[in-house]
Structures are given as structure tokens and as C-alpha cells.
Image (cartoon, rainbow, N blue to C red):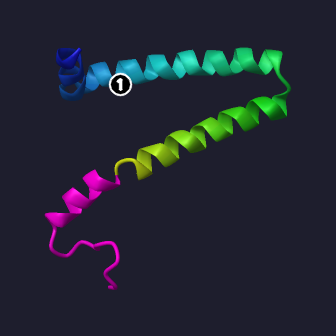
Amino acid sequence: MAHFLTLLQENNLLSTVLRLLLAAVLSLAIGALGEVLDYRLCMTICGLTTMLVCWLTVFLRRRQVQQVLAGRPNAAQPGVPQ
């Protein structure tokens, strides 16, 4: 599994293909969900899921972002006025 993740990070083509496959599968899943549920309910579920993924992506990586910014002397640091 670790070898696959390393290969995925190093190979842009493989990463792009996997992302496109995931997008295709998710679009089919959303279409199937839209056939079963009301349109507004389907869009609400998908919107909330997207917001959750974005929130987790941003806020769970704060420590890594701070480490990157710590290496830059002119970068804004949290809690320090500009």
C-alpha cells in the first residue's frame, strides 16, 4: 500500500486518471441518488458532504501549513498582527 501511495504521488498521469475515475463514479452515484430522492434533498446531501470534505481538508492540515509557513520569514503567523 505504501508503494502505491508513493507511486501515486510521483506519477501525475496515474493521479489524474484515478481522480477522473473517482469523479465518474461519484457522478454516477449522485445521479442514482437523485433518481431515488427528491432533487433538493439530494443537492443538500451532496453540498453538505462537499462542505465537510473542504472543512476537513483545510482545518485538519493546520499544523502542516504552520510548519511550511515557519520556514518563510515574511509569511503571516497566526496571532501576530501585520
Q: Is residue 55 above or below residue 12?
A: below
Q: Is residue 5 above or below residue 62?
A: above
Residue 36, quarter of the rendered image: top right
Could you say where residue 52 lies in the image, as x and y percent from the top left? 56, 42
- Circle count: 1
Q: Which residue is mark 1?
A: 16
Residue count near mark 1 (Cα–Cα under 10 Å), binned few <14, some 14–19, many ≥20: few
Quadrant of the image containing the N terminus: top left
Quadrant of the image containing the C terminus: bottom left
Between residue 81 and residue 32, name the one nearer to us: 81
Given the current orientation, which residue lies at the most extreme right position? 38
Let me know if residue 36 is in the magenta part. no
Q: Is residue 52 above or below residue 79?
A: above
Q: Is residue 72 above or below residue 10?
A: below
Residue 66, quarter of the rendered image: bottom left
Q: Which amino acid type is shown beneath numbered disc 1? A: Thr
Could you say where residue 57 lies in the image, as x and y percent from the top left? 43, 44
Which residue is pictured at 83% across the width and 29% down the height?
A: 39
Compared across the picture, whether 43 is left or right of 82 comes to right
Compared across the picture, whether 33 is left or right of 82 comes to right
Between residue 29 and residue 58, name the one nearer to us: 58
Between residue 38 and residue 78, name the one nearer to us: 78
Which residue is pictured at 28% across the width and 22% down the height?
A: 13
Which residue is pictured at 18% across the width and 23% down the height?
A: 6
Compared across the picture, whether 23 is left or right of 10 comes to right
Magenta segment boundaries in residue numbering = 62-82
Could you say where residue 75 lies in the image, as x and y percent from the top left? 24, 72
Could you say where residue 24 lies in the image, as x and y percent from the top left? 54, 18
Let me know if residue 78 is in the magenta part. yes
Which residue is pictured at 29% across the width and 19% down the height?
A: 14
Secondary structure beneath disc 1?
Answer: helix
